[in-house]
Amino acid sequence: MTEVSDILMSVLSTIRVPRPGDRVHKDECAFSFASPESDGGLYVCMNSFLGFGSKYVDRHNAKTGQRAYLHITRTRKTQVQKQKEDDSNSGSGDPPKKKPTRLAIGIEGGFDVEQEQYEEEFKVVLLPERLDVTTEGLASMPDVVKERVSLSIAGLQAADSVSHALQVQQWDGEVRQESRHAAELKQLDNGVKIPPSGWRCEVCDLQENLWMNLTDGKVMCGRRYFDGTGGNNHALQYYQQTGYPLAVKLGTITPDGADVYSYDEDDMVLDSKLPEHLSHFGIDMMTMEKTERTMTELEIAVNQRVGEWEVIQESGTTLRPLWGPGLTGMKNLGNSCYLNSVMQVLFTIPDFQTKYVSNIDKIFGEAPSDPTQDFKTQVAKLGYGLLSGEYSKPAPDPGDDPNASTESRGDQIGIAPRMFKALVGRGHPEFSTNRQQDAQEFLLHFINMVERNCRSGMNPSEAFRFLVEEKIVCQQSQKAKYTQRVDYIVQLPVPMDQATNMEELQEAERRREEVEASGAPPPSAVRARIPFVACLAALSEPETLTDFWSSAVQAKTTATKTTRFASFPDHLVIQIKKFTFGLDWVPKKLDVSIDVPDTLDLSALRAMGQQPGEELLPEVAPPPLMTPDVEVKAPVLDDSTVSQLCEMGFPLEACRKAVYYTGNTGIDAAMNWVMGHMDDPDFSAPLVMPGSSSAPGTTPTESIPEEHLATIVSMGFSRDQATRALRATNNVLERAVDWIFSHLDDLESMDVSEGGRSEGGSEASREPPPGPRVRDGSGKYELFAFISHMGTSTMCGHYVCHIKKDQQWVIINDQKVCASEKPPKDLGYLYFYRRVVE
């Protein structure tokens, strides 16, 4: 005990007590998915508060010299223990747990965050000797040791862990804002009184999905849903005639509130004066009972009626669970199925396996002092967790149902990618939340992060990168212009007019209208069948450009644009553009079945470049915006054209330049300019127009934030380069990062500060900067994975992925990993192909 006391005394200065704001990682290892429930428990550094599994704690000790760790182990309580506690609590006066009433997590009325009931044990462990210090042993040590160590232990026990804080981050599927019309809503004194029941639409006599306008009390039916159910749009049409903005859904009114919709704000809203507004028409909220489903409940019902849920999840058959390396499930962290599906597919691709899993020891060995914030470390940790098989084991049987084995259901322990999700979503307005997201947008976001973190060495995103050639032919002069751009995903439109079952669809629509008129329940929806070749043809057919400014004829004319592959990537991602907008601009999802092929030959879509005898459009500047006057004034840019370009994803300053240099001649001319100047070093640099007081190279006088410098330097750039980027963008970090990646040619010629590059960066900087590196080969592919979406929009519903492993299709539905019996290839959203090796 004297030896232990002496060691603690010698390291006392390294033992800290957590303060508010300290990040305490006491639920998850920084390098693995080990937790206090795992074999060996979790070791929490009592200085940095980082957690380590038994496999990595010795490495941390050797690297940092830190010796004191709080060892936490948790064992699940048995059903007998839980029952005893429940029995003892039943007489304590504690209220029973409430059933959730909202589609929400971590808020009043929502779901409680699942808290397993565990027995916990704590002790201090001293490394490298692995000497244990229990509470009893600590009591006999000198007061200074006992006080400091006891305070640190108590602080760590009381601290909210980072993973728990993320888990209980408020998420509300029904989150609504107060309507701007609620406070001052004018209600007509027209003597209208609404009875407590027996409502009908005043136009079509429909008796369900009824909405009462809060201005004059008119009762009308709601919108027609995309599957043909719902109402006949009479409430919406009434708003369009009158402009009366708010309506309440009759049948959802209870003492706790009701569904209120603002047509003007185009959203479900809160009305803090709802009792007063209802009372105006004789409705007493306190006496009303719910008789209709809320909009949230209808959303779920509509989703299930579509039939996708059962088909995509293959819930009609008993699926055989699979276990082992590469067959590891991922826990849903609250609408994280989009992330789970994308990462499962990416780590079946050799490039990502080689980059992050084959080199895992080197990555972990070079990890910074806080590996939880390092992109490469957390991606490697996730990849190893998916591929190793260490976590592909049956989840513990909850014991609630002795006949329901988790192994037979396919539930796994799996991995919970909390650190990874927090890191890749940090600072992003959508991916940092617990809301559902678009899997395609997340895939591009992650590829962008890979690009930024792989400036030197192997870049796995090259597996998807390809060049697109766009050929524009002036129809008056027959002269052509060729441009190339980099892309990662092929987006295929869905030509609904090419459905092979058009007669069946028209008959279904006719029956639906008849049924609606009779007031009977709507028939089941008929799914449109679209040939894949029709989608491909819609992509490759020439597009007509009107108002094209031709440099050959120095005037606006008509042109045609054709798009072809200038290179074929190793792995091809195809997105079926199922999500669109209806005539009323309400987002909707096309209910389609597409016969996506197992093999694909795109060789006929390879770009041919300039043809013999073909003349190119001359590089002639368009007409000036204005004739110079005595006083030079800055021209006015067409804001609508600038906005259209920005919505396509181009930088604001580049869009402004495009409009300026094409003389405000329209979207087509501006788009042509963008495509021809994307590789310009100053593509995203601010536009300086005549009459502007600033000039290129103007340096802001304010100091540069050190934390912004550190962030850019961590991406592999030198301090000088980071400084230049921040000065060019007024110290706005996001703009500086975009600027630096669009000025690589200029930056490579700068002197690189010592230590400013990641490994291999300084050597690479001596070489001339290459253009976007693409791989090329045959245009023949085979399907190996697809991601499917269930629901009415990308902002709700659920994602599932199917992956072909060893000639067997596997369905991965979060923590469930099973052999697929009927992979629904026709209902996919994202399709992943790999090149066929001939």
Image (tube, rainbow, N blue to C red):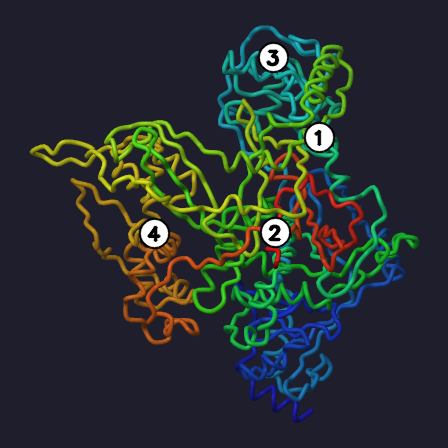
Give above or below for 473 relative to 259. Answer: below
Q: Residue furthest bottom?
A: 2
Name which residue lies at 47% across and 59% down. Answer: 451
Label 3: element kind: loop
Are the residues at dot 3 and dot 1 in contact (C-beta closer than 8 Å)?
no
Mark 1, residue position = 302
Mark whose residue sits in front, 4 or 1: 4
Alpha-carbon span between mark 2 and mark 1: 36 Å
Mark whose residue sits in front, 2 or 4: 2
Mark 4, residue position = 679
Q: Position of residue 83 (x, y in %)?
A: 88, 57
Label 2: how many Cα within 10 Å (few below 14, some 14–19, many 20+): many
Quadrant of the drawing holding the C terminus: bottom right
Residue 210 seen in this snapshot? yes
Q: Position of residue 683 (x, y in %)?
A: 31, 49
Specify which label sits upstream in the sequence, 3 or 1: 3
Name the one closer to the observer, 515 or 157.
515
